Amino acid sequence: MTASMAFYADAGTTVRLNEYGTKSPPILTLDGRDHTLSVSSFGRIPVADQLAFAHALATTAADYVKAVETYAAARADGDQKPDGQP
């Protein structure tokens, strides 16, 4: 199965981690105004695979932070809107 979706964060978006100790895998949740995205894995997936995914997610999230910082720095002149937007 293949799925594709877009989640656009705004000032009201929250990011939450639900932990269940050693009973179940954790769930990362992004809550928006009218939508929620949950990221987790099935408990039946090998723990090594779950951990590899978590590391890849963390690395990519750190890269996303750097990209947003670069984007924000380019707008340090007071232009807070994307290129071409009124």
Image (cartoon, rainbow, N blue to C red):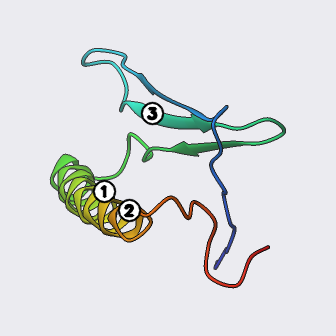
Q: Which residue is mark 3?
A: 27
* Picture disc at residue 6: none
Q: Is residue 15 above or below residue 78?
A: above
Q: Which residue is mark 1?
A: 65
Q: Position of residue 38 (x, y in %)?
A: 57, 42
Q: Residue at x 25, y 63 (%)?
A: 66
Q: Residues within 10 Å of mark 3 (few under 14, many from 20)?
A: some
Q: Is residue 73 above or below residue 13?
A: below
Marks 3/1: CA distance? 21 Å
Q: Residue at x 74, y 76 (%)?
A: 85
Q: Is residue 14 above or below residue 53?
A: above
Q: Quadrant of the N terminus?
A: bottom right
Specify whether 5 is left or right of 67: right
Q: Position of residue 34 (x, y in %)?
A: 84, 39
Q: Quadrant of the C terminus?
A: bottom right
Q: In the current view of this chain or complex, which residue is farthest to the front?
A: 77
Give the foreground label among 3 and 1.
1
Specify whether 34 is left or right of 22: right
Q: Position of residue 62 (x, y in %)?
A: 23, 56
- CB atoms of marks 1 and 2 within 8 Å: yes
Task: Name which residue type carries label 3.
Answer: Ile
